[in-house]
Image (cartoon, rainbow, N blue to C red):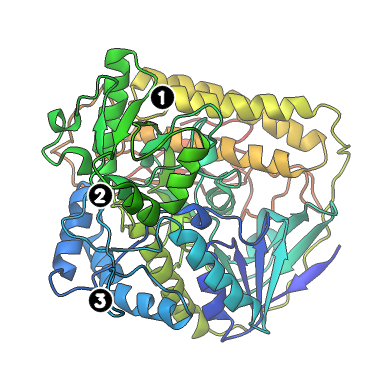
Amino acid sequence: MDILDFDFVVVGSGIAGLMSAIHLARYGRVGILTKKDSAESNSNYAQGGIACVVTSDDSFEEHVRDTLVAGDGLCDESVVRTIISAGPARIAELESFGLKFAELPGAPGAGYDLGREGGHSRRRVLHCGDITGREVEQILLNRIRAEPTATIMEHCVVIDLITSGWLGADGTNRCVGGYFLNTRTGAISAFRAPFTVLATGGGGKVYLYTTNPDIATGDGVALAWRAGAPIKNLEFIQFHPTCLYHPEAKSFLISEAVRGEGAVLVNAQGESFMERYDPRGSLAPRDIVARAIDHEMKLRGSRCVYLDIRRQPVEFLKTRFPNIYMTCARFGIDMGSDLIPVVPAAHYFCGGVEAAVDGSTSLPGLYACGEVACTGLHGANRLASNSLLEALVCAHAMAETVGALPRAQPALAIPAWQSGTAVPSDEAIVIEHNWNEVRTCMWDYVGIVRTNKRLERARRRIGNLRREIQQYYFDYLVTPDLLELRNIAAVGELIVRSAIHRRESRGLHYTLDYLSKDPALPPAPARASARACPSSARACPSSARACPSSARACPSSARACPSSARDTVIRDPPGGRSPDSDWKI
């Protein structure tokens, strides 16, 4: 088995991953693992832009206030202030790399053509038309490819992280590497590095309907959880209100910036309805808009609602939203004369691996940046276009922290991967069936509106599926589809468990059994933590029941600590079975 040694390994090639690698390349050898082509990422599909204070009529205080309001009481204000105040320097850095943001028409230097999106009190969203993510991604790819100390490894799926505790090393348990599958060759190799950065994005594919690309299977959250890192606020899944509704349109987002330029949400009769739900109308924060659309659709038995931007000239629409305009036209929709059919779809994880602004987690050697991380910026609901800002700021802060740390670590021996008695699968249909069942279950029972009964039903079904998936994982050789199925099932269960423990409605978590916020409890983040052996018990080397991510033995049982709206902490006592084989709360 090949073992690749680096000073730093970054898992993921979106904006958070690439920016992390660019900064880390100044300090040593960087390996970038990405499971598809290097340009394929959630970032690549980001349409809106980057929220940042860049004009004299705006202020950090206003941006902070808008973020805190959207976060519905769960933002960490110190984190919000740190990230927002660091924004201008990161924008200047992108421009120094050659990125050109859209400017106002007229003479050069007329100023940025700033967009406004839901929840923002000012125009402060820098953009490159409606393909901002793609433009930033390409600039960063060009930059990292020119770095002599950086190596990009495409079509590589990380199976599990490796900890020193699992290797039996003395001293503090830390992340020291990981096993990965090359999906082109089928070979399993390992990487070894003092520092591993998870920048894998979110997990929209956990749900049946999503704006995310196929790669968004929650891999980083699952990897960190299996390694024992706490997972925080995972009940807060943002459903984007306006995904294009068309039988041939797969996961195509109609940017919130369209509403920022005057589009209004209407029903099939052409009646504007958002004013009945929020005084900000169609520019209310996403959680409010998504619930309003869901209610309108159920109230009227409609399959969708519509965006009406017919008040804007066609030439403006073509210039401001070239990608959206062309895509709609391809499906027979003229933005200038037709209503645009839209529905909500899973879009963004506000929770994730518990991490500081510099990406540090509770597991030494493991860092998390971007959507995979939960820093406290977003709270219970993300303010539009704050995500790319967070990715840029946190990647820079992480590299500054890690670059100053000593990289001399003992060169621990990593055992070769052993597949035991596993054989090639002859029943791939099982994976497809379980994949669809997990996603359908999450959409039906853990969606925009939740109830205790739905969540309990989801917990039972996802638990049964995870046991079936685990057995399949033991019996057959790993494949990319199996690894992704394993991850979406694990993340789905973590979402369900987090949602069950939050007994109030707040931000993106809305339950009919607890319609109000709980005033008796402080508005602090919920937290879920797994401290035990993951589901990778079969194929890890040297022991059929060992796990590279575990610092200690698998638990004999699982119990929940007393929970509140503030914390959901799961602690698993040492001694016996994996939570995958017997998971109890």
Element type at mark 1: helix
Residue at figure coordinates x 59%, y 52% from the top left: 223
Residue at figure coordinates x 20%, y 27% from the top left: 515
Choose top left, top right, bottom left or bottom right for residue 46.
Answer: bottom left
Residue 260 badge: 2
The quarter in which the C terminus is drawn is top left
Q: Which mark sits nearer the N-terminus, 3 or 1?
A: 3
Q: Are marks 3 and 1 in contact (CB under 8 Å)?
A: no
Q: Which mark sits nearer the N-terminus, 1 or 2?
A: 2
Q: Which mark sits nearer the N-terminus, 2 or 3?
A: 3
Question: Is residue 477 something one can see in this rendering?
Answer: yes
Residue at image mark 3: 110
Instruction: Please state which of residues 116 and 213 is positioned toward the viewer in this rendering.
Output: 116
Q: Badge 3 local density, few (<14 within 10 Å), some, or many (20+)?
A: few
Choose top left, top right, bottom left or bottom right for residue 3.
Answer: bottom right
* Alpha carbons under labels 2 and 3: distance apart: 21 Å
Residue at figure coordinates x 46%, y 19% from the top left: 457
**Given the image, on which type of amino acid does mark 3 rest?**
Ala
Element type at mark 3: loop
Closer to the camera: disc 1 or disc 2? 2
Compared across the picture, whether 257 is left or right of 487 comes to: left
**Given the image, on which type of amino acid does mark 1 rest?**
Leu
Residue at image mark 1: 455
